[in-house]
Structures are given as structure tokens and as C-alpha cells.
Amino acid sequence: MNKLPDEALVGIPGGTLITATPEEGRKLAMLIARHTIHQIQPDLDKLVAGRPSYAENPDSLTAAAQVVAIEFQTIAAANNYWR
């Protein structure tokens, strides 16, 4: 198995949801979403092999965006909506 590096399998990169700005929060949400996929499928070869089946599928892309939105919502709440 061509395993992803351990740093790609961390659930909460950096160990915190606290960010200085909403932009940093959005970037963290994207990173957490990617790490979630890596935790579900840690075999890099299988992960890359499956990409063509979802990379151009509008439903798959919408689902991915929803995952990021949910992660961002969680991060925003953890940051008291940056108030």
C-alpha cells in the first residue's frame, strides 16, 4: 500500500480550530476535509485512481463543497464567529 504520510492523517491539523481570521478558518476547513478523505482512504494509489470518477461529477463536487462548508461552520463557531 502506498500510504499517505502521517501528517495527512491528522484529524485536526495543528490541534486547534482557533484561527485569527475567517480566511484562515476557511483554509483550515479545506485542510480538515482533505484529511478526512485521507483517513477514510489512506492508500494514495486508490485515492488517485478514484479521482477521475468524481473530479468532473457535479454531484460529487457539490458534496465536497458541503463537507467544507460544515467544517467551516464548526470552525466559525469555535472562533465565536471572529467577534
Image (cartoon, grey):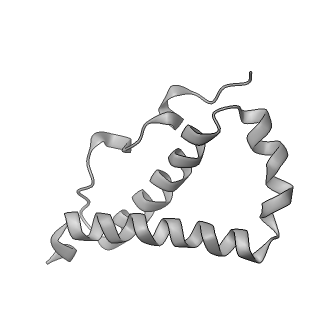
Quarter of the picture containing the N terminus is top right
Residue at image x 59%, y 41%? 40
| Residue for point 63% across, 33% down | 42
Q: Position of residue 29 (x, y in %)?
A: 43, 61
Say if 2 sits above or below 44 in the image: above
Q: Quadrant of residue 41?
A: top right
Q: Residue at x 84, y 44 (%)?
A: 49
Query: Which quadrant holds the C terminus?
Result: bottom left
Is residue 57 shown left or right of residue 5? right
- Vertical comparison of 80 with 4: above or below: below
Point out residue 78 in the picture as x, y percentages from the top left corner: 21, 63
* Residue at (73, 24) in percent of width and height: 2
Residue 59 lies, in percent from the top left, at: 72, 75
In the displayed structure, 28 sits above or below 11; it is below
Q: Count the marks: how many?
A: 0
Left or right for 35, reference 16: right
